[in-house]
Amino acid sequence: MKVGTAGSMAGICPSASPGLGLHPDDLPDGLVVADAAQRVTCFNAAAARITGLRPADAVGRPLESALPLEDLDGRRWWALTDPYGGLATRSGQPERNLLLPGGRQVLVSARYVRERPGGPVVRVVVQLRGTEARRRAERSHAELIATVAHELRSPLTSVKGFTATLLAKWERFTDDQKRLMLETVDADADRVTRLIAELLDISRIDSGRLEVRRQPVDMAAAVLRHVETYVRAGLPRDRFRLEVAEELPALWADPDKVDQVLGNLLENAVRHGEGRVTIEVSPAVTKARTEGTAVTVSDEGPGIPEESMARVFTRFWRGSKRGGTGLGLYIVKGIVEAHGGTITVGRAARGGAQFRFTLPVGAPAFLTQG
């Protein structure tokens, strides 16, 4: 047995198998075990931390007394589930949210151990987990909803306002005024469409369902298209410097998603950076030691503080207060990783931000066989 000293929160459990070299106190989750007589025989350190109970006060007591759990309706959980006297075919309870004394929430699952099918329960094994991770996920979802609601409100208000005004007072406006309002409505509708596309991308990334439709991609031409778009929009051509290696491997990737990655990285460099934006396209070796293509986007702005670099690819990270949902780089990372590639952030030679992503060549099997 491993026993804690008086007042200690070390667990009290039977010793581990020497072959495994593992003790219940090594487990990250709470473990409570009761024997055939419904007495607690094991109460590990994580269970003590989660419940706030001393192992010495729990071991030897009836399970229902040592771990008095209630469901969210206030019903006593052990009386409700009756692990020792219930159906002989039951093998346990799935994880659910229960309450400890004082209303503290804990995630609980149970396993009923029988020596033979249909036989009496000889051991009940209970797993306890704190609800912090679930609360973080719920906060993240709530923040996503709040962000989306905020971002949708502005363009929808604009669309509604201009269309209502045009419908009510169409004859009072000149053609130029009508055109200006309709262009504004069109731009705001595009903004809503982009936001909805971002939400769909996040859903697919989080669920692992982001599809990649591989086709031949000319990365240098794709970068040049984005640069030309900014030049046509009025930015000086010398704001950009494009450096492309003479020989690049044949790249197979999803062209639409590659455009999405390039568009986001260049927009960040133009909007949040300063000086010249440098885009380098070169052959590279991927993390898996295979052939690939690397794209590096650098600017000459203030860069990203060291303490923020670890959070750049998380949801809602914003490099400045210049608007945006803070979802773009999270989506970029998801797209790159869906291709089997990697993306990193660092400091450019002139102090600005530098993003570098590498995609494997991704050639279809019929091109690599034979």
Image (cartoon, rainbow, N blue to C red):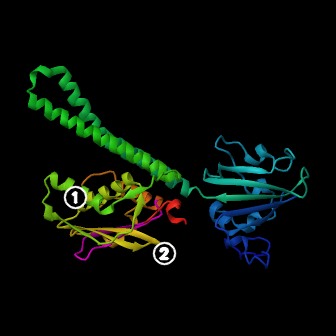
| 90 in relation to 216, above or below | above
Q: Indicate the position of residue 251 as horizontal and vertical percent values.
A: 40, 63
Inspect the magenta stretch and tell me whether residue 199 lies in it.
no
- Numbered badge on residue 289: 2
Label 1, label 2: how far apart the Cα atoms are: 31 Å
* Residue 345 lies within the magenta run: yes
The relative height of residue 109 versus residue 185 in the rendered view (above or below) is: below
Against 324, residue 288 (above or below) is below
Residue flagged by tag 1: what amino acid is it? Val
Q: Amino acid at mark 2?
A: Arg
Q: Main secondary structure of the magenta part?
A: strand
Q: Quadrant of the C terminus?
A: bottom right
User: Visible in this render: residue 267?
Assistant: yes
Q: Are marks 1 and 2 in contact (CB under 8 Å)?
A: no
Residue 319 lies, in percent from the top left, at: 29, 61
User: What percent of the width, then of the height, locates residue 164?
Assistant: 22, 25
* Highlighted range, magenta: 339-359
The numbered dot on residue 189 is: none
> Which picture quadrant has residue 302?
bottom left
Judge the density around disc 2: few (<14), some (14-19), many (≥20) Cα neighbours within 10 Å. few
Which image quarter: residue 125? bottom right
Closer to the N terminus: mark 1 or mark 2?
Answer: 1
Residue linked to disc 1:
227
State left or right for residue 352 relative to residue 178: right
Residue at screen point 73% across, 74% down: 23
